[in-house]
Each structure stands twice: as structure tokens, then as C-alpha cells.
Image (cartoon, rainbow, N blue to C red):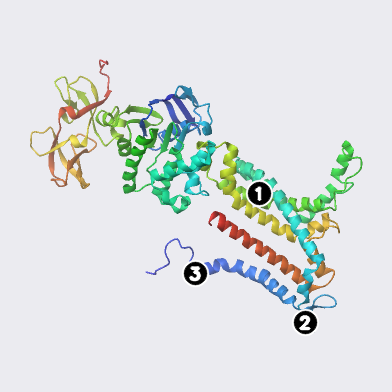
Amino acid sequence: MIRIHDVTRRFGQVTALDGVSLDIEEGEFFALLGPSGCGKTTLLRVLAGFETPDSGTVSLDGRDLLGVPAHRRPVNLMFQSYALFPHMSVENNIAYGLARERLPRADIRARVAAVLETVGLTAEARRRPHQLSGGQRQRVALARAIVKRPRLLLLDEPLSALDRHARAEMQLELKRLQHEAGITFLVVTHDQEEAMSLADRIAVLDRGRVHQVDTPVELYRHPRGRFVAGFAGANNVFSGRLLPSGGLDVPGVGVLPAPAGDTAGLVAVRPENIRLAAEGANAPLPGTVLDISYFGGSSRIAVTVPGLDRPVLLTVPGPATVTSGARVALSWDPDSAVLIEKTGDTPCPDP
Amino acid sequence: MVLRGKAGSGPRPRARFLLIGPGFAYLVVLLLLPLALLACYTVFQRGRFGGIAYADGVTGENFSRIADSLYAGVLVDSLRIAAITTVLALVLGYPTAYVIARLPRRWRTVALILVVLPFWTNFLIRTHAWIALLSSQGVVNTALTGIGIADRPLELLYTDSAVVVGLLYAHLPLMVLPLYSAIERVDTRLLEASADLGARPARTFWSVTLPLTLPGALTGCVFVFVPSLGNFVVPELLGGGRTVMVGNVIKDQFLTARDWPFGSVLALALVASLVLLLMAQAWARRRLWGR
């Protein structure tokens, strides 16, 4: 539905978007994930019409979008700051966009009432934005955007201003609304958990470039490249050479469990896939427990391994059974080690 | 350890007193005391050569004279001229302030300095310059007759219009500055949100920018209206003897008619009407914008 092709935008020396191409499908919940300054907000502003790219094209349903001024685009943006009109009541804020479509008053009133019901703010209809809580303001901003029934709804860090509890509630709410309204959602976030829980597909951006576009599960299981592996959940990344007989030969450490291969590269192992055993057990990786963080449902343990410059992270369910300073051994299934990037001079037979 | 007020509550009482003291004392001595003196004058009778004849006892007749149609007419004329000046200042000042607020940052500073530049020259000299511009042999008339637009000099000076022009010229910066600061403070994201919701630029201006800058416009109106109403230099120089405003009458009562008690009544009436105006403005502001 939305086709972004080779879009580049520079601000002076900074390249905010560097040849970005994306296809977003009708009815999809799509997330742009990346650290701050990766260009995701610039891309959102290009789609909304507040920013013109230096090169590249954007089309909606096959028709060029860049030549259309912001106020004529069938695209609405929910601002990170909400940008509610402070001099208007909640209902007037929501009615504003409908009044611009010159709809009959009765229709406007009906649609405003319906959307207020949906977001649960009927009682607050006549309040001013400054009389609302953060979560309520956020719902007004959302209502103001969806009441227009746009083809594409853009959400800029929609949950960043909410506390943990309101966030979880609002995530479910967003999913439900997206499902009910059938609107294509494009959400921008720096929070990988948020992106994973909300989106059908995620594009990972860094420094203006798209690193990977995939479903949350694929992104989690098969990250491509060190950046994605690190950003989409804390991965342990090992650099070495895959052996034809199986295993990853890491210089100075030894052979670690990994699938068979014959290339040099980076291998990622997720913290929850690593098993902890007592020292001396038949495990390939001996180390010392550095520290333990307890999260209630699980614990995260950092283990220093001689020969590796970073501690290996692993998670175990419940409280940890080891203490800081204990000598332990680590292991994992070869299948849970994923080759994320080929490196080095070894010519590899690419498919 | 010494316990103090909660953090961020500003200077402590003694420091607060020291900070506010000098300015406050200045205002008390030079504003409130003279006002009290004026209030005192109003109930006495005039002295023969000016001043107050305290020995003749108190009277209420100074107040009844204000109802005289002569003075009521002057007050109405003054209000009318000050109102016209204020409206013109708003109409001319808003676009100016709007453009300045949208300039690149360093050009904004240059433009603001240009706006207040006239204040660097003496007010009397600037007003006299208008006589040179508007008189029958003045620059404007010479140009008009020279080009042939007018066959004989137009009567520009010593009219109500000349007074309005002079007052407008004197007070326009006082309109532009508060408007500029109000327009500059409008969050550009609100303008983007308006466009995003389907509003053309003109609609965004009427529905978002203008309502959000009305407090600034109101402040500018008060800044222009108040000194325009009391001004006596401009009507005297540019209005000749023909346009009389409250300020002129008050000045005449003190300096020419030597009727200090009645001059005091008029002066206090002017102050009172301005206080009422400011209270109305504060009320409107609270009512409309909740602050």
C-alpha cells in the first residue's frame, strides 16, 4: 500500500535517511525500531508531509504522495508530544479534523461521541487538555487521529510518556483499535519490547539505514548483523570460524556449540538458551559469575569467560542458584547458535 | 543544619525583601504618594493663583463638574481616538510581529532592534518631525502637489487623523513586542497537527495561531490604549487647538486654568478608568484562557 523507495534526507552533514526502501501492506501494524537519532522520526515526518526528502519516492496505492501537501494526505500523525490544542476542549480537539472535511454537524457529533466511547473518555469530553492525565491526553491524541479514518496512521513513540502500568494497558488498546478500525498503523519506537509486542513486522533502523525487515519472531530468532542482534534483545555475539564438523572455533577460547559450516563470522546465542552447570561438568565454556540481577520471574546472570572481552549473559527462570564469584560452566544446543554475519576473507558459497 | 523552605521556592524572605525593596520603594514614593495627594486635592477648593485653598474647607462640587457635557464629550473623544489608534496598531502590528517571529533567529534580533529604534530618539523631536511631514508646505503635501495628485495642499495637520497618526507612530512598538513574543511561543507542532488534520494554512491561522496569541494581542492593546488615552503632547502638537483629549484638559486645569482640585478629579477619573480597563482585561484573560 505504502511504498517508500530509496528515500534520502540530509540535514547539513548529518544523513538522517540513507536510501531507505520499505513496503507496508494494507492493514498491517508496522514498527520502525531504532535508537534515537536513527532517522525513524524523519521518515515519519516525510510520510506526514512535514519533511521533503532530498531524493527518492513515496507512493500510496500507487500514486505519488510527496507532491501532496500535508493537509490533503490521507495520513494522520499522532505526535509524540500529543500536540493537543490547549484552547479547545477534548471534543473540539477531536472534532477539528472532521470539521475540516466539511462533514455535517450531526455526523461530526456522532463520530466524536463514538470515538470518545472507544477510548473511554466520554466523561472528559468538555475538559481542556491541561486538566487531563498523561494517559488521558495520549488517548485524546489517538482519538483525534483515528476519528479521521486515515489510510495510514503514524504514531511517534506513542507510549513513551506513560508509566509502566499505563503502557501495558495502552499496548493492548492499540492492538485492539488497529484490529477494529482496520487502519494501517506505522509506529515509531526505540523500545524493542514495545515493537515486538505490537507489530506484525518490524524494520530495524540505524543511522538512516534499514538493517532488517522481518516479523518479530524472525527478528528475534535470526537477527541479521551485529546491530540487529544487539538491539533486538541482548544477544551474546561470538566471533570465530564455523567448522565443517560442527562448532564455532573462537581463537583463545576453544570450540563452542554451533551448527556446521565453513565460514568465518559472527554467531549469536540468546541469553535464555544458555545452560548453567557446575564447574568441571562436561561443558565447553568455563567462567566466573560476575553479577546477578533478579527480575522476579527470572534472573539475569553475567559470567566472565577467559578469552572473551565481554561477559556472557544468560537468563534463568526464578531466582539464581549460584552466587557471585562462583566458578561455573556454560553450554547450549548447537542449533540455538545463529550465524548473523559472515566476515573475514573466506570465500563463501552464497546461494 | 539549618532548615530552609522547600527547594526551588525562590529567595528567602530577607533576600526577597532586599530584591524587591528598591523598586517597590521607588514606586510607592513616586506613584502612590502623588496619587494620594491628588485624591486629597479633590475635596478642597481652588486657590486664586493655583494651588489649594485649604482654609476654605471641603466641598463636593469638583466631582459634580465632571458630569458637564463639555468634559464628558472630551472623554468620549479621547476614548474614540485611543480606540482607533489601538485598532490600527493591532491591524498593522500583527502582520509585522508575525513575520518577525517567523524570521531566522538572527534576523529576528535585527528586526526587533529596528522596531524599538525610534525609542532612541527624543519623543518630542519625533513628534515635531510629523509636523514637517504633514504641514501644508510639508513633505507629503509638496510631493502630492508635485506629482499632481492634489492641485492644492491637503489639510493634513491639526486634524483628528494627524493625532491618530502621531499616537500610532509613538505606540506601535508597544503592540509589536508582546505580539511577537506571543506568536513566537506558539508550538510549531500545533501548527503541524492542524495541517495534519486537514487544515489549510489560513484555517490553521484562524483556529490555532490567532486564538493562542490573543492574550498577547490583548496585552498589546492595553499597552497602546493606556498611554494613548492620557497622552497630551501629540494632540497638542499635531491636533493644534482643535483636538482636545483628556490629557490636554488635565494639563490645562493645572497650568492654565489653575484649578488644581478639578484637574485632580479628572486625573483620578482617568486613572480609575484605566484600572477598570486593566481589571476587565485580567478578567477576560482568566475567563478565556484559564490563567
Give the quarter of the image for residue B47.
bottom right
Subunit ID for the residue under disc 2:
B
Residue drawn at (78%, 74%), measured in percent from left and top? B62
Q: Is residue A138 above or below residue A234?
A: below
Q: Position of residue A211 (x, y in %)?
A: 35, 28
Quadrant occupied by the C terminus of chain A: top left
Viewport quadrant of the N terminus of chain A: top left
**Category of crowding for the residue at label 3, using alpha-carbon neighbours closer than 10 angstroms: few (below 14), some (14–19), many (at least 20):** few
Residue type for callout 2: Tyr
Residue A258 pos. (x, y %): 17, 26
Q: Kindly report which numbered mark, 2 or 3, lies closer to the viewer in this rendering.
A: 2
Question: For numbered disc 3, what is the local secondary structure?
Answer: helix
x and y, in percent, of residue B35 in the image: 69, 71
Residue with the mark numbered 1 = B176
For residue B253, above or below residue B83: below
Q: In which chain is the residue bearing label 1?
A: B
Please name which of the two marks, 1 or 3, marks the residue nearer to the observer. Answer: 1
Count of all numbered marks drawn on residues in the image: 3
The residue to which callout 3 is attached is B13
**Nearer the observer, B65 or B98:** B65
Q: CA distance from mark 2 to mark 3?
A: 43 Å
Who's the residue at 77% across and 73% down the image? Answer: B64
**Residue carrying label 2:** B54
Give, as a three-letter code, the residue at label 3.
Pro
